[in-house]
């Protein structure tokens, strides 16, 4: 199998053998080209598959998994909208199947990562759980009684629930969680407040720890927004656990401890979910895509091993 995880920065591709082992992992910059980005992504998957075939002629991929961000309609195989990447109503599954010449499973990147966490990672011991990725954007995968709930492709878009009066969000709304508390938003908001450019949210956290009042204000407001949104999730779904991954989760206790404290301060009679860090890591999306691809071959639970993979340089 071959699996592709399209992100805002990189396209990850994994070649997976018949035992579910990742043989090789490649990364390429996401080919951003406005309204033609969908076409460019398909071309990139073809090039990556050709690279794998040249490097590993002994392995013949029989199916592929492709996952992308944004609003995804899995039933139709369509990327409905990705406001940060430029496509609308793009028929990814059909065009990828035609271009790659093998069956293709198509899904949402966070739902795929959530499935990897649910089957192999931090969420595997729970039936009712929400897996949230906080990076450039914010989205979640919802599991109810062991079943992934997609809501026709609209479920889990918690990044676009309103938690504040501003700033404006790329979706057209104001005060969306993604515009306040995503890793990208934290860096962007700090620069707007302080006038000091930063490399990312990690630098904002470091400045907050060093006593920078602007950084502290931005970090605290992000935690407040996340706690408020999680309280809504708890009230609605009563999950046993909430698993958080993505770039912001790398903050560790600086994120999880104050977030848990804030959430506890909001909840009253509701079930208290366990807050857990994702375990699979940055390859969760591509592993989830591989799991989906394996299902096309009617093989039950392939169990790709997320541990040590060899990543070829760009």
Image (spheres, rainbow, N blue to C red):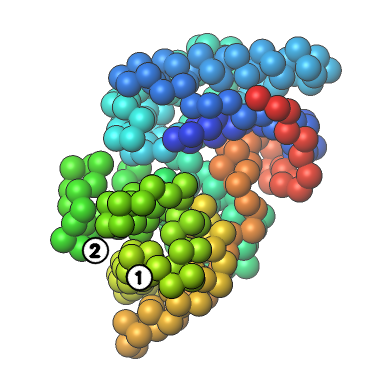
Tag 2: Cα neighbours inside 10 Å, few (<14), some, or many (≥20)?
Answer: many
Q: Residue at x 44, y 68 (%)?
A: 208
Residue 129 in sight from this viewpoint: no
Work out which residue is located at the far right of the displayed protein and give it.
58
Q: Residue at x 38, y 78 (%)?
A: 263
Determine the image quadrant of residue 108.
top left
Residue 307 in sight from this viewpoint: yes
Q: Position of residue 37 (x, y in %)?
A: 39, 20
SS of the residue at dot 1?
helix
Residue at the spot of label 1: 213
Left or right, residue 22 beside residue 129: right
Q: Nearer the viewer, mark 2 or mark 1?
A: 1
Work out which residue is located at the far bottom of the displayed protein and give it.
269
SS of the residue at dot 2?
loop
Determine the image quadrant of residue 300.
top right
Q: Residue at x 80, y 19 (%)?
A: 56
- Of the numbered discs 2 and 1, the one sitting upstream in the chain is 2
Q: Nearer the viewer, residue 140 or 192?
A: 192
Q: Position of residue 30 (x, y in %)?
A: 49, 27
Q: Position of residue 41 (x, y in %)?
A: 47, 21
Residue at the spot of label 2: 163
Q: Position of residue 191 (x, y in %)?
A: 33, 51
Tag 1: Cα neighbours inside 10 Å, few (<14), some, or many (≥20)?
Answer: few
């Amino acid at each position: 199998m071959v699996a592709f995880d399209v992100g805002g920065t990189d396209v990850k591709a994994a070649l997976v053998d018949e035992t579910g082992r990742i043989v090789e992992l490649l990364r390429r910059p996401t080919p951003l080209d406005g309204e033609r980005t969908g076409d460019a992504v398909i071309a990139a998957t073809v090039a990556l598959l050709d690279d794998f075939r040249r490097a590993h002629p002994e392995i013949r991929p029989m199916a592929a998994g492709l996952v992308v961000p944004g609003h995804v309609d899995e039933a139709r195989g369509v990327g409905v909208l990705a406001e940060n990447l430029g496509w609308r109503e793009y028929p990814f599954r059909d065009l990828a199947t035609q271009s790659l010449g093998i069956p293709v499973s198509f899904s949402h990147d966070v739902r795929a990562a959530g499935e990897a966490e649910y089957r192999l990672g931090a969420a595997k011991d729970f039936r009712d759980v929400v897996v949230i990725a906080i990076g450039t954007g914010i989205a979640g995968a919802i599991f109810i009684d062991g079943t992934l709930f997609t809501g026709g492709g609209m479920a889990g878009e918690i990044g676009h629930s309103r938690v504040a009066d501003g700033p404006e969000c790329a979706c057209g709304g104001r005060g969306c969680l993604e515009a306040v508390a995503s890793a990208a938003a934290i860096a962007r908001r700090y620069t707007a407040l302080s006038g000091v450019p930063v490399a990312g949210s990690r630098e904002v956290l470091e400045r907050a720890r060093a006593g920078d009042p602007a950084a502290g204000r931005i970090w605290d407001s992000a935690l407040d927004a996340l706690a408020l949104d999680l309280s809504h999730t708890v009230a609605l779904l009563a999950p046993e656990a909430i698993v958080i991954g993505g770039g912001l989760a790398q903050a560790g206790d600086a994120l999880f401890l104050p977030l848990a404290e804030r959430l506890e301060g909001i909840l009253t009679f509701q079930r208290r979910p366990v807050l857990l860090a994702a375990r699979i890591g940055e390859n969760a999306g591509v592993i989830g895509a591989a799991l989906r691809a394996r299902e096309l071959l009617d093989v039950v639970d392939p169990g790709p091993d997320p541990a040590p993979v060899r990543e070829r340089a760009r």
